[in-house]
Image (cartoon, grey):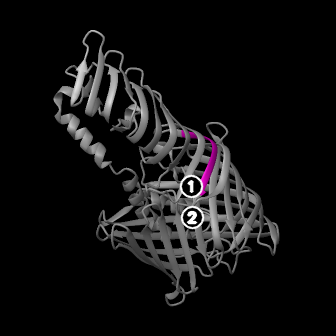
Amino acid sequence: MHKKIYLLSALTAFAAVFNAAQTHAYADDTDIDLLNYIQEQKDYARQHRENKELKELRADIDNEKFIRPLDPSKPAPIIFEGNDISYDSGTGDVFAKGNVRITHDYSRITTDSMSGNAKSGDTAIPDKAHMAQSGDLAAGEPNIVMDGYNTTYNYNTKLGKMENVKGSIDTEQVSGKKMEFYPEEMIIYDGSITRCPAKKPDYYMSADKIEIWPDDHMIAYNAKFWIKGQVIYKKDRYITAIGKNASDKNSTIPVHVNYDSDDGLHINYYYDQNLNEKIKAYIDFNYYTKHDLRNVYGLQWADGKASVRLEDGYYEDSNNVWIKKEPTMIFDYNTHIANTPLSFGFSTEYGKWDDDIKSSWHRSHSVSLSHAPINLGSPKIRLYPNIGYSWIYESYDSSNSNNFYYNATVMADISPKLVAYTAYHYSQSTTQNSLFDYGYDDYSKKVTAGFSYELTDKDRIVIANEFDAGDGMKVMDRDYYWYHDFHCLDMELRYREKRNSWHIKFNLVHW
């Protein structure tokens, strides 16, 4: 099923799952999606981990009181230090050799020799220089750790350049033949960028020119995406959000590689382009060795609580059931009911569905009501209830069907490493009484249960179960997961015991 949930809290995770399940009762067969927030919290912590060098730099500067301005309303002074230093108070010229340090605010450049001017703010470093800046993101200043040569920089105008650079800007690892500094942006020429900090990155993007607006967006010209030394994608002009504006779908290297015994090797790439403030066009590119191309193309209008999508393409649910929509129109509306713990959702879809056996003009309407988390004696044990109703019409057999469903999920944070869940689902609609199997199970009453346990900082296991509650709690699915951090990528290994199938996924964008 073409959906991904990347959230940072259990509350928003459940809200997203329940909203996705308005038309059909089940979000996933074993409800493993309910645990997605655990991995997202780990990714968030890694991406926002403070750089040790910058932390020490900030502490060092705070301890050197003379570096800070005596009058906070005035700019911080430029401090020049070195074993051999000369200063002309008349002209402002400065020359320094040996263990040279140039410090301004929370930024420092170290080198062997330099020349500059304390009045104009100019500095020139012909040999190797190391730059470290503990930036203030609120003021648009990035965190920078960079090595380069032939550096010039003006501390008053914020203009400068550096050649043969290699280092990091916030969470991005960069390199290039030349880098230019401006007050609000940086430009890298003949460079590369990645979130893989290895000496030889497994994946990266190269470009003739990369324009970076820290914590906002990036533009790359003649961009090439590389994995293991092979170019997998090219684009003349690539634009993506970075920093606080970024999401899982517009990360620097927006490529996912998966393999499972049902679909074979799967390469996924998502790209969208804003046409204006409310409308965007997008493509969800999917190549499968067992199915060839199965893309989704779409156009979306979104305005707060409401959105409309026009989509055309292939979709797969958690039971490996495929369907093609050619095309479909989907309207969603979700809102919190004021002064209550309730949220209301409405969704309607109209489009042509095809499963290679039959085609039908599918029309559905659904409403849902969900309750805010209910603490069961402790905030660590929470109940998430949800109820809904849908009406479906199919032109293929002129059938009308109604579906009443409800869900109740209990989540328990047993310890910082152990999280468990159990859920009960009821749905009138199943594969037995619906025209299409897509999105449904074979039975109406379902119980899921599972747990996640963190073995190490890099390893986590999950066991998830699905039971037919109407058939003596018969085990329908039992899945085993192993999540491992390979430094530059995440691996998710899944074994489906009842289906005897293997699935492996590599996520290249988390770092």
Q: In the rendered structure, which amino acid carries the disc numbered 1? A: Gly
Question: Is residue 58 on the magenta stretch?
Answer: no
50 shown above or below 150: below
Q: For mark 1, give the secondary structure.
A: strand
Which residue is under mark 2? Answer: 388
Question: Is residue 223 on the magenta stretch?
Answer: yes
> Which is nearer the N-term, disc 2 or disc 1?
1
244 shown above or below 399: above
- Location of residue 455 (image quadrant): bottom left
Which residue is under mark 1? Answer: 345
Task: Name the residue at 54% across, 69% down.
Answer: 505
* Magenta part of the chain: 218-226
Task: Name the residue at 50% across, 75% down.
Answer: 493
Work out whether residue 333 or residue 72 is closer to the camera in this orientation and state it.
72
Quadrant holding the N terminus? bottom right
The percent position of residue 355, horizontal first and vertical second, equals 76, 72
Q: Main secondary structure of the magenta part?
A: strand
Q: Are marks 2 and 1 in contact (CB under 8 Å)?
A: yes
Mark 2 vs mark 1, CA separation in Å: 9 Å
Q: Is residue 233 left or right of residue 212?
A: right
Q: In the rendered structure, which amino acid carries the disc numbered 2? A: Gly
Give neighbour class at mark 2: few <14, some 14-19, many 20+ (Cα, 10 Å).
many
